[in-house]
Image: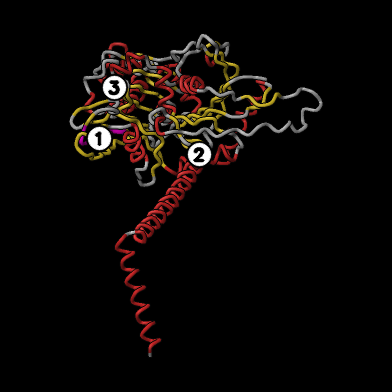
């Protein structure tokens, strides 16, 4: 039986599917890569047409299955897109003096944080920042003595409608989800070094229609935001010069530079638009740099003030936009940061002959990060090449749902709607059982009190007096 992992990334304008196999030495061999244009159904990483997205997902699966000659039973999914943001939250628990903190207390804080309600927002994941034990900060407070326990969390939010639409797409497409991950967290695990995460850094994923900013400090995600600006905005700006999108995109890829020194600008030089028209170099540079400056300044604005000057790892750039000439120099100048690195590929060794992978242009980092997260075999039954290939395959065992526990907070794992529904049903059942148990205990306790009263000397004395009284009355009535 085939053995491979499949990951699907819903990018800002396209859907990418990849299949690979993990080797014993930790490397990953890529078996297949496919891309499907999704500009008609996905905008800025958000599903805006369910039917077309279902069709696009189906096309990705079919293409992968044709290459692999094997059915795909389940997939790992990456989620990103506009409106994803992080929100800090603090949960406090007052304790009796000299109380030792237990695992259940810590899990209680996590559960209380997870139950927070945000208008029109869904908590995708919760990242523990640190705990405050009385007045001391601790990563793990278990075992410490205190009277006040405070949990600091970073909740990652997304619009509920976006979350529901995404789940509906995979359900309608008949695609089983092995695990759903936050793409920015999977990307960070794939491209950042341990030193960058510990020392602090800003990871900037420059996509086509969105730019994702992740801030790490002391190995913990401190802030996450997605801004609705990307390299396609530069293309749109160039179309204002009365040219088609395709021409503008080609000119951007060929001539654009994120930064051009004033001494390098030739006032007489022109770039051809078509056979009859051209654009002056100074005007072209002005359009490109103006938009890049807006993107960089908005990205840098997302870095919380408390971490300014503390991020020893500097800035790490990835994504398709990181391929633009002098992009690192533009970031250095506009953010006043000396340390800027471009991550064209992941830190894991990747074995592949696909030009899409070997280009190491930053466009495949996220989906490779998702592939690295996978640990379950995604292969189904083999596809036959015989004349009987249209026959219905034997029924495969159902995909077992993945259960999530409280301790998985901050790992970028997102619960699907089916998992949430199952979890809520289990929780309701548990609450009902606890209520029944409390009622039973109360009834048993009342019964014990009743028996105790009956067996008490006072109760026996009262009953004796009552019995004596009844006999006296009966005798008097008999005498009459």
Q: Measure the C-alpha gap from mark 2 to mark 3.
A: 31 Å
> Quick check: 160 above or below 443?
above
Q: Which residue is mark 1?
A: 150
Is residue 235 something that shows in the picture?
Answer: no
Where in the figure is residue 187, as x and y percent of width and height? 42, 22
Task: Write the residue at 51% across / 26% down.
Answer: 246
Q: Which residue is mark 3?
A: 217
Find residue 342 and report its horizontal and vertical position in percent: 38, 14
Q: Which residue, given by chain and number where applicable, does mark 2 sit on? A: 419
The quarter in which the C terminus is drawn is bottom left
Q: Which quarter of the picture shows residue 66?
A: top right
The answer to whether residue 387 shows anywhere in this view is yes
Question: Which of pointers 1 and 3 indicates the residue nearer the eye?
Answer: 1
Front residue (pair 364, 196) = 196
Helix, strand or loop at label 3? It is strand
- Whichever of labels 1 and 3 marks the residue nearer the N terminus, that label is 1
The x and y percentages for residue 470 are 37, 77
Residue at the outermost right position: 387
| Badge 1 element | strand
Viewer-side residue, 341 vs 447: 447
For label 3, the crowd category at 10 Å Cα-Cα, with few meaning under 14, some 14 to 19 and many 20 or more, is many
- Residue at coordinates 53% horizontally, 22% vertically from top-left? 375
Q: In terms of secondary structure, where does tag 2 sit?
A: helix
Farthest-out residue, front: 479
Asked if residue 12 lies in the magenta stretch, the reply is no
What residue span does the magenta drawing correspond to?
146-153
Q: Position of residue 267 (x, y in %)?
A: 32, 16
Q: How is the image coloured?
A: secondary structure
């Amino acid at each position: 039986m085939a053995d491979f992992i499949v990951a699907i990334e819903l990018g800002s304008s396209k859907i990418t599917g990849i299949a690979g196999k993990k080797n014993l030495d930790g490397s990953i061999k890529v078996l297949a890569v496919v891309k499907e244009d999704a500009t008609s159904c996905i905008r800025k990483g958000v599903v805006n047409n369910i039917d077309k997205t279902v069709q696009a997902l189906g096309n990705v699966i079919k293409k992968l299955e044709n290459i692999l000659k094997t059915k795909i039973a389940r997939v790992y999914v990456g989620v990103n897109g506009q409106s994803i943001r992080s929100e800090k939250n603090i949960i406090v628990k007052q304790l009796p003096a000299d109380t030792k903190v237990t695992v259940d207390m810590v899990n209680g804080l996590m559960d209380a944080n997870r139950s927070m309600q945000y208008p029109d927002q869904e908590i995708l994941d919760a990242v523990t920042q640190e705990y405050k034990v009385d007045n001391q900060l601790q990563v793990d407070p278990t075992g410490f003595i205190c009277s006040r326990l405070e949990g600091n969390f970073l909740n990652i939010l997304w619009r509920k409608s976006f979350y529901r639409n995404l789940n509906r797409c995979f359900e309608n497409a008949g695609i089983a989800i092995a695990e759903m991950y936050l793409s920015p967290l999977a990307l960070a695990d794939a491209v950042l070094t341990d030193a960058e995460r510990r020392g602090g850094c800003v990871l900037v994923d420059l996509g086509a229609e969105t730019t994702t900013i992740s801030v790490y400090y002391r190995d913990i995600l401190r802030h996450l935001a997605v801004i609705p600006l990307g390299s396609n905005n530069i293309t749109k700006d160039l179309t204002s010069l009365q040219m088609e999108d395709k021409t503008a995109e080609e000119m951007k890829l060929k001539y654009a530079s994120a930064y051009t020194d004033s001494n390098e600008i030739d006032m007489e030089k022109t770039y051809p638009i078509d056979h009859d028209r051209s654009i002056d170099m100074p005007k072209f540079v002005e359009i490109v740099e103006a938009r890049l400056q807006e993107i960089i300044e908005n990205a840098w604005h997302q870095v919380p003030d408390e971490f300014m000057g503390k991020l020893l790892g500097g800035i790490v750039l990835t994504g398709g936009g990181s391929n633009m000439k002098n992009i690192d120099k533009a970031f250095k100048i506009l953010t006043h940061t000396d340390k800027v690195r471009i991550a064209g590929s992941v830190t894991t060794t990747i074995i592949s002959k696909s030009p899409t992978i070997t280009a190491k242009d930053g466009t495949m980092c996220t989906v490779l990060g998702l592939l690295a997260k996978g640990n379950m075999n995604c292969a189904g039954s083999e596809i036959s090449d015989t004349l009987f290939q249209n026959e219905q395959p034997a029924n495969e065992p159902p995909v077992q749902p993945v259960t999530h526990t409280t301790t998985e907070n901050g790992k970028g794992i997102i619960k699907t709607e089916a998992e949430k529904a199952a979890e809520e049903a289990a929780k309701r059942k548990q609450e009902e059982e606890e209520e029944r148990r409390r009622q039973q205990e109360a009834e048993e306790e009342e019964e014990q009190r009743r028996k105790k009263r009956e067996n008490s000397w006072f109760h026996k004395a009262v009953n004796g007096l009552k019995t004596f009284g009844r006999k006296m009355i009966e005798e008097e009535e008999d005498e009459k």
